[in-house]
Image (cartoon, grey):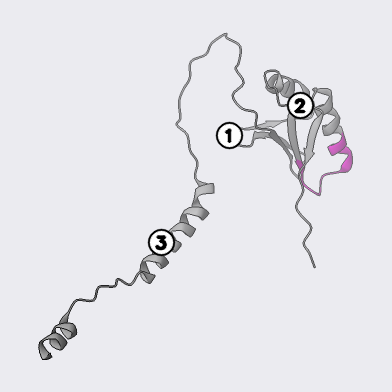
Amino acid sequence: MQVNSSQSRHSALSEINVTPLVDVMLVLLIIFMVTAPMMQQGIDVDLPETAASGVETSNEPFILTIDKNEKIIISGTKDKNRIDITLKNLRPKLNAIFSTRKNKQIYLQADKAVSYGFVAETMAEIRAAGISNIGLVTLPKASQ
């Protein structure tokens, strides 16, 4: 009987404490969730020029941003290309961008310091380019 009790005292512990493992995995998950949106992907390639017509590659809407100095910037939602443009050249540029796209939608975000008149002129140029689906981007009001 004593032999059994001495074996039980010196036997290996069969349970593994997984709490530290779970803690480390959750910290890694949080780190990846925070850093994933900041990662830029893509390969820098110098493509040849051709006379062929463009092919629609995305149905993602474009974002048109007006900063506080009334500078207009066009950018896609996924690609990192930004185009700085003036109000005078906006309509021809939008015509060129949206000529091959089926989804004629654009999001307009303007700094709150920009005059209403300039935003209205910009919207008129967007509509004149044949884009009737304009989404206005705002921040939600903070609840008090």
Give the magenta range: 109-120
Queried whether the magenta region covers residue 138, the answer comes back as no
Q: Earlier in the sequence, mark 3 or mark 1?
A: 3
Closer to viewer: mark 1 or mark 2: 1
Circle 1 residue: 79
In this figure, which residue is indicated by the disc labeled 2?
A: 90
Mark whose residue sits in front, 3 or 1 = 3
| Residue at position x 74%, y 37% in the image | 107
Label 3's element?
helix
Using the rendered view, name the quadrant where residue 64 is placed: top right
Q: Which mark, by number, is residue 20?
A: none
The answer for how far apart the CA atoms under marks 1 and 2 are is 19 Å
For disc 2, the neighbor class at 10 Å (few under 14, some 14 to 19, many from 20) is some
Q: Tell me the quarter of the picture where residue 9 sits.
A: bottom left
Q: Where is residue 94 in the image (x, y as percent from the top left)?
A: 73, 24
Q: Earlier in the sequence, mark 2 or mark 3?
A: 3
